[in-house]
Every structure is written in structure tokens, then in C-alpha cells.
Amino acid sequence: MRIHFGVADLSRTQVLGVHDPMWEIVCAVHRLQTPLGRHDYMAWRQKLRANLHQAGGLPAIREFLIPLLPRSAYFPDLLTPAPSAHLDVTIDRIQRTDVRRLRRELGRLDPPAYARNAVADVAEGRPAALNRLGAALRGFY
């Protein structure tokens, strides 16, 4: 995809003045799924793995984050709602997503067999699954 900006477009472009935790999560999960730059990010990867292992967060990443945020041409838009500097606000927005949208966007994914049930539970809006997704996002961040 290419987006071409002219002078008029650039004059109307605004940059968010704060970081967005959800986009940080998305980019980090995508980075974990590629060997590109592995050497450049080795120290970060090792520290992240150690922290997640210590906190017991590795299963949640495998079960939720990698299947829901595949490094591919598509991942669900509902996982990057309107920018917010507060992760809890973003997680609340995700957890309140209409079930029809959950089904539509998550239905486009092809999760690995080990994660199909977890992804299906999120797609159906099951509170326990949405709570586990929220905990996985918080734990990863």
C-alpha cells in the first residue's frame, strides 16, 4: 500500500502528541515474529523473554497475542482503536467491541490449531476470553 501526500494533505496532517501503548504492543509482537533484525534486537528479545517467563506471561503471548496479531497483511483493526496514552482505556475499548465486529474481524484470521479455541472464544465475546486477552496485553506491555 502506498499513500501519496500532497502539500494540502501534509498541511492537514496531525501527529499524536503521546505514545499509543497498543501500537507499541502490535509492533513489538510483530517484531518477535520475524527473524529480520534478530541480531539488532537480541538484547531486547532476551530481556523480554526473561521478564515474561518470570511473570508467567509466555503462554498468553502464544495463545492470544501472536494468533491475534499475526505478522501478515492483515490483523484485526479492533485491536488498534482510537489512540489513547492509557492502556486500560484501550483494553476497555477492545473488550467492549460489538460481537458482530469481533466475529467479522477475527473471522478473517487463520490461527494455529493450538489457538483456535481461544480466538473463537474472543470472537464470540466471551467475558473470560476477553479478560484473558486484556491480561495478556497488560502483561506484555
Image (cartoon, rainbow, N blue to C red):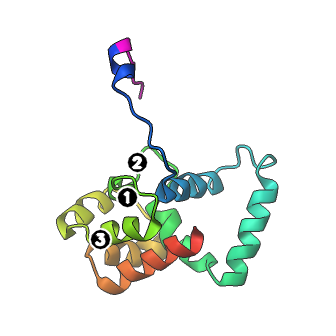
Residue 72 in sight: yes
Judge from the rendering whether residue 73 lies leftward or rightward of residue 139; answer left or right: left
Residue at position x 39%, y 64% from top? 90
Q: Residues within 10 Å of mark 1 (few under 14, many from 20)?
A: some
- Say whether disc 1 or disc 3 marks the residue closer to the N-terminus: 1
Q: What span is colored magenta in the figure?
A: 1-7
Q: Nearer the viewer, residue 23 or 126?
A: 23
Task: Determine crowd level at label 2: few under 14, some 14-19, many 20+ residues with C-alpha closer than 10 A.
Answer: few
Which residue is nearer to you in this view: 92 or 11?
11
Labelled pair 1, 2 in contact (Cβ < 8 Å):
yes
Instruction: Between label 1 and label 2, give the one nearer the viewer.
Output: 2
Q: Position of residue 95 (x, y in %)?
A: 32, 73
Query: Is any atom of residue 63 visible in this view?
Result: no
**Alpha carbons under labels 1 and 2: distance apart:** 8 Å
Task: Tell whether 11 sits left or right of 41.
Answer: left
Q: Quadrant of the N terminus?
A: top left
Label disc, if present, on residue 74 of the rendered structure: 2
The mark total stands at 3
Whole-Å distance between the Cαs marked 2 and 3? Answer: 16 Å
Q: Which residue is mark 1?
A: 109
Q: Earlier in the sequence, mark 2 or mark 3?
A: 2
Q: Which residue is mark 3?
A: 123
**Magenta span contains residue 35:** no
User: For the residue labelled by badge 2, is the local secondary structure a helix, a strand or a loop?
Assistant: loop
Q: Amino acid at mark 1?
A: Leu
Instruction: Characterize the magenta stretch by its predominant secondary structure.
Output: loop
The answer to which quarter of the image holds residue 128 is bottom left
Based on the displayed image, in which of its 4 quarters is residue 89 positioned? Answer: bottom left
User: What amino acid is labelled 2 in the image?
Assistant: Tyr
Query: Can you say whether 84 is above or below 58 in the image?
Result: above
